[in-house]
Image: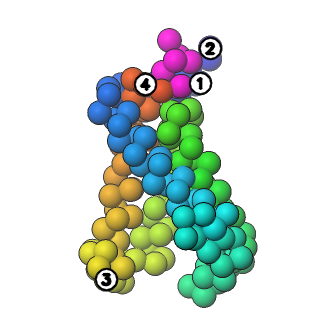
Amino acid sequence: MSPLIKSLLSTRAGYGLTILRIVVGIIFAAHGSQKLFGWFGGYGLAGTAQWMESIGLAPGTLMALLSGGTEFFAGLALIIGLLARPAALGLTILSLVAIFSVHIHNGLFMANNGYEFALALLGGSLAVLLEGAGKLSADRAITN
């Protein structure tokens, strides 16, 4: 295995990060499925695209595909722990965009549509990005 791939898939983390990775992955995958498929009360691709356009993220359909696709597929990658660091990088960028394009002007708290929840997801994504997928992961199984 090449050193680059081994360093990408390696992990220093234990079981605690495994739990964090799975929980954050479930949340992101569910949010992505709302955007892409309209599951769990979401608006689907067309509705999400309209909303993206309304907040200035254009073209709306492309932005909805990129955000929904990143949330859904990177969320699934976190759940199984496969390519967790690249997935976490995508989710980190997505969380920063959400914070600064939607939530920052509303303050911290979720009651005012603030950035509290997005910040928590950003923290979880950054933890996986820095530490790797954890003990129970496809990444660890591949590198051992």
Q: Quadrant of the N terminus?
A: top right
User: Which residue is labeled 4 in the image?
Assistant: 136
Residue drawn at point x = 46 percent, y = 62 percent? 95
Which label number is shown at residue 112?
3
Which residue was labeled with disc 1?
Answer: 5
Q: Kindly report which numbered mark, 3 or 2, lies closer to the viewer in this rendering.
A: 3
Q: Quadrant of residue 4?
A: top right
Overall secondary structure of the magenta stretch? helix
Q: Which of the 4 quarters of the picture holds residue 17?
A: top left
Give the number of the mark in front: 1 or 3: 3
Q: Which residues are magenta?
A: 138-144
Picture coordinates of residue 111, whole percent (x, y): 29, 79
Q: Amino acid at mark 3?
A: Asn
Of the numbered discs in the image, which one, if any, rests on residue 1? 2
The one nearer the camera, 51 or 106, is 51
How far, Cα to Cα, is label 1 from label 3? 43 Å
| Residue 80, placed above or below residue 62 | above
Residues at discs 3 and 4 in contact (Cβ within 8 Å) = no
Give, as a three-letter code, the residue at label 4: Leu
Which residue is found at the position 57% from the left and 34% from the top?
A: 83
Q: Is residue 139 magenta?
A: yes
User: Element type at marker 4?
Assistant: loop
For marks 1 and 2, give the CA distance.
7 Å
Q: Residue at x 56, y 32 (%)?
A: 82
| In this view, the mark in front (2 or 4) | 4
